[in-house]
Image: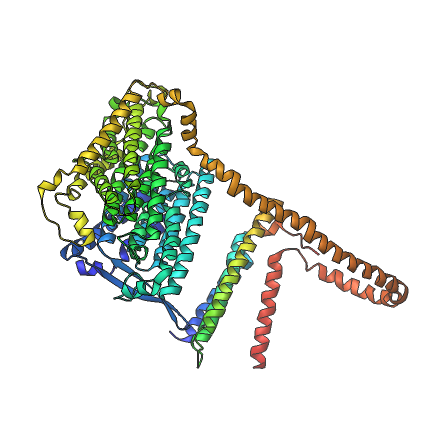
Amino acid sequence: MNSWITSNVWLIPATPVLASLLILGFGKSARFTSSAVAVLGQIAALAMSIFAFVPTLHSHSFRAIQNLNWFTFGGQTLRIGFVLDPLAAAMLMMIALVGLCIFVFSIGYMSEDKNFSRFFAYLSFFSGAMLGVVVANSLLLLFVFWELVGLASYLLIGFWIERPSAAAAAKKAFITTRIGDMGFFLGILWLYHASGTLLFYDGGRGCLENVGLLALGASATFIALLIFCGAVGKSGQFPLHVWLPDAMEGPTPVSALIHAATMVAAGVFLVARVYPIFAVGAINGVTTSLTVVVWIGVVTGLMAALIAVAQSDIKRILAYSTVSQLGLMMVSLGVGGVAAGIMHLLAHGFFKALLFLGAGSVIHGCHHEQDIRKMGGLRRLMPVTFGTYAVGMMALSGVPFFFSGGWTKEEILHATANWSHSHAPHYLMMIGVILTALYMTRQIIFVFFGGKRSGSEQAHESPSVMTIPLIVLAVCAILFSVVLTPAWPWLESYLTGHPARFDPHLLLQPMIIVSLALVGAGVSLGIWMYRRADGRDPLQQAQPALFRFLENKMWIDEIYDRTVIALSAILARLSDWMDRHVWDGLVQDIGRIGQFFGRVTTSTDERVINAGVDEGTVGAHGFGRLMSRRHSGQIQTYLGAIALGMLALVLLYAWLG
Amino acid sequence: MTLSILLVVSAALFCIGLLAALSRRHAIFILIGIEMMLAAANLNFIAFWRFAPQPQPPTGVMVAIFAIAIAAAEAAVGLAMVIAVYRHFRTTNVDQLDQLKG
């Protein structure tokens, strides 16, 4: 069984895609069948992921690859393939498990939607594409799945297509990520030009192995930066982060699955996957491309955390929190903590999906109210949601010891502290940790504590089909920390290939005390600031200008409107003007020359030739009238005539031999 | 895999495409039919190249890829025309479009 799945990894992404096609075949009315097929497909993917996970445990640095020729073009053979290594196996497990929870949750959340089955078809399609990104062993194949994931994201953000804001958000997400993907694609072309292969691993000849990396030489920096463009777009890094908060227009399970747990992590995964290209020619673990990654991550992490403090939509707070956490992961990758970054990615997948589904449960319970200032007192009305949400909040804030996020954040802070280039990211990320604790405390206080407000009067607990996935994810968010502790860094050793030792003394490190202090500071600052908040924001009253600056997302959207979008509008208007006045005028002038000659010939015609031809025209007129009856104006009649004519020619040819 | 099988498939594809282009009333389906006929032509091209006595490595693929690229451009123009026609006539049913009438 084990060897069977390691040599057929492609089955894992294929199963949900197949489920998706089946669901589309069933049609709109098969609501129960659709959800059942989607969930079964996801269970099958999860089971196969577990079977694929088991053999990777047996040996350190396990790697199974299967490559095949896609097509031959002249002397060049384009090859694609699939790979199973610890990085892929861990991601497979996370995606399949979180995906399954979200599928089940969606059955409850979307139960009243008229396009229920289409939703599950898209979800399955997304799941398959995302699993494909993880197991691709060729940058080209990864790019194909990457774009399929982007398509699924577009379809799901715009799922409620009748809302103009959802349609606009879907378009914005698609176009913004396309800008990054353009760079990514150029990077792929350059990589192929430089190394002659797009396979990651190919028995020593892949582009991530010694031969390929040597061939890159100095161009590695540019290739890495171009590939990073794609990651910036997909993972919502500054300056292409603007699409992610708008993507919250989609149904909440979609936000949980795509825009929190899996797809946006694909950028981080991509950087981790092609890390050797980033690290070519590293001195003390520092290269130009990695430094860019660090600073983009730092800017994104801090900016998004600041904006999150002043948002009032429950999902937008989580969206900015996601942007900020992705920045943190990028910082970790950039400073060399690849394992720490991926560990945070996996842990984040669990607890952010939990938070989003919790938010979905709150929104469902409050009858589609999303403004946290109108909620309040939900602690008693929705106890299960509150309990699981609190777990998610503590995991996200990074409370040490019991919650997965605490350990991974501590690892990341550790990695940034050891960066030889600069210590600034370390201290800036500490501020980020405080801000995370602050805005999550603010959200919890607004939503769950205090008295009932207008939006929460009629609130009710969600059905068990929605609360059970919450509980499963909450348990995951806590239990996952067992394999993350520095005392027994099992996951880190699994990812890096160094054997792990159990050493309880490492449990209490100075960095743990530091992160405990940081989280404590953030939470107590939050409690102190918002303790008496009753539907109004104390920060808004104390610092209205600052609050407005943050509430409007630092006016980045407006800046883009005035610069990039205005510029392209001006260009479009310029081309329109050129078309109307310059080219059109030119054509008109040429036409006038023709008209002049026309007038000359008319006069000769009328006086000299006309008389003789007049007679002939009578006959032609009759024939013309006969033919004009054939001209019905129906293009299909014309097409049919062409087809008949062609058939006649073929028959003639056959007859004449 | 012999040449004749490929030719039969391609002929079938062409006929299906032609039938779609002739019988569907929706402009987009007609475009789809035309695309199918193009695909059939491409398949023929590749098949003859593949089974030629001495296939030159890139020629057949080159022409097919060229044709695919042109087909993509054609589809873009065609769809844009369908949208323009829809905006103008408020319909994409080709039975109701008889402005070409002589």
Residue A499 position, x and y percent, is: 13, 53
Quadrant in the picture for the C terminus of chain A: bottom right
Please identify the quarter of the rendering in which residue A616 is found: bottom right
Q: Is residue A161 left or right of residue A338?
A: right
In the depicted structure, whether residue A461 falls above or below residue A588? above
The residue sitting at 65% across, 47% down in the picture is A577
Q: Is residue A438 left or right of residue B74?
A: left
> In which quarter of the view is residue A437 placed?
top left
Camera sees residue A137: yes
Q: Considering the image in quadrants, where does the N terminus of chain A appear?
A: bottom left
Q: B94 or B44: which is nearer to us?
A: B44
Q: How many marks?
A: 0
Picture colour scheme: rainbow
Give whichever of A352, B49 is nearer the camera: A352
Give the x, y percent position of residue A242.
42, 40
Vertical relation: A301 (above or below) A581: above
Residue A117 in the image: above or below residue A355 = below
Residue A350 located left or right of residue A309:
left
Which quarter of the picture shows residue A475?
top left
Q: Nearer the viewer, residue A49 or A582?
A: A582
Q: Is residue B89 visible?
A: no
- Which percent across, then down, holds residue A33? 31, 44
Q: Residue at x 72, y 59 (%)?
A: A628
Q: Position of residue A212 (x, y in %)?
A: 31, 64
Q: Residue at x 40, y 50 (%)?
A: A229
Say left or right for A558 vs A97: right
